[in-house]
Amino acid sequence: MVDIKMIKDEDISGYTLVEGFPGLGLVGPMAISYMIDKLGMEYIGYMESDQFPPIVSIHKSEAMPPVRLYSSKQHKIISIFAEFAISAPMVKEIGDVIYDFLHKNSVKRVICIGGLPAPDTDTDKTYAIASNQAELKLAKAAGLTPIIDGVSAGVSAILITDSITDEKQVPITNILVPVDQSIVDPRYAELAIKAIDSLLGLKIDVSELESEAKEVEQKVQELLKKSKESHEDYKKVASGEDDKMYG
């Protein structure tokens, strides 16, 4: 079971959710981490599940859940920052839980961030998928290129599916940055943030993004590795394959 817990009683009705779970190029975590820092966003909640890998994050000597919610009252934004990759069997449940959370809290809009595998990443072009024509029009006005044919996957795909099948839909735009799957480049996060700026008018200074994104990349890569190892060890213990883990 997946649940979202709030540690602060904050009215987030009318806010925009920015989501970017780890995926191709780590575009989401790099961009969201930078936004949290530059916008001074506050830690307000977390996501939990007994199916998450058994890890805890340490930030400034404080132990924290690896999937956290942050908010900015000034900009009316909330974000979800995750430090491990979501396993395929959990994607739908997480997407559905987030969408239900949006309705319960009257969140007005969602912007998802992701990577798009592309043969040519030497471009400033950023793509978009939208849940309705009004969102697509806003994306085009912000300089994003609509994807004409293709498929989407992951949590963002579940959110879009929930939106288009919901009579009182929460509108969603999925920003997709062309990435080389073999590398992680801070420029991917820069393109994503510039696209978000165009959509929301946040005016985020990206001059320090390269150095900070590299740090985020290293931390997330390390956590991804640890979460995978922890999850594998945990499965061995649960199945009784590794007696050493009990000693």
Image (cartoon, rainbow, N blue to C red):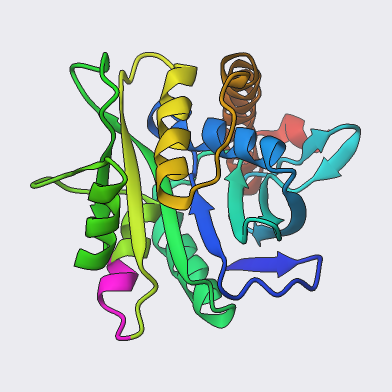
- The magenta segment is 161-167
Which quarter of the rendered picture does the N terminus lie within? bottom right
Which quarter of the rendered picture does the C terminus lie within? top right
* For residue 43, side relative to residue 212 (left or right): right
Q: Position of residue 202 (x, y in %)?
A: 55, 45
Question: Which residue: 68% across, 36% down?
Answer: 38
Q: Nearer the viewer, residue 43 or 63?
A: 43
Q: Position of residue 165 (x, y in %)?
A: 26, 77
Residue 177 versus residue 69 in the image, above or below: above
* For residue 96, side relative to residue 177 (left or right): right
Q: Position of residue 194 (x, y in %)?
A: 44, 34
The quarter of the picture where residue 101 lies is bottom right
In the image, is residue 162 part of the stretch drawn in magenta? yes
Question: Which residue: 36% across, 61% down?
Answer: 172
- Whether residue 96 can be seen here: yes
Residue 17 versus residue 201 in the image, above or below: below
In the image, is residue 165 part of the stretch drawn in magenta? yes
Q: Nearer the viewer, residue 86 or 180?
A: 180
* For residue 234, side relative to residue 61 (left or right): left
- Whether residue 132 can be seen here: no
Question: Which residue: 48% across, 38% down?
Answer: 28
The quarter of the picture where residue 181 lies is top left
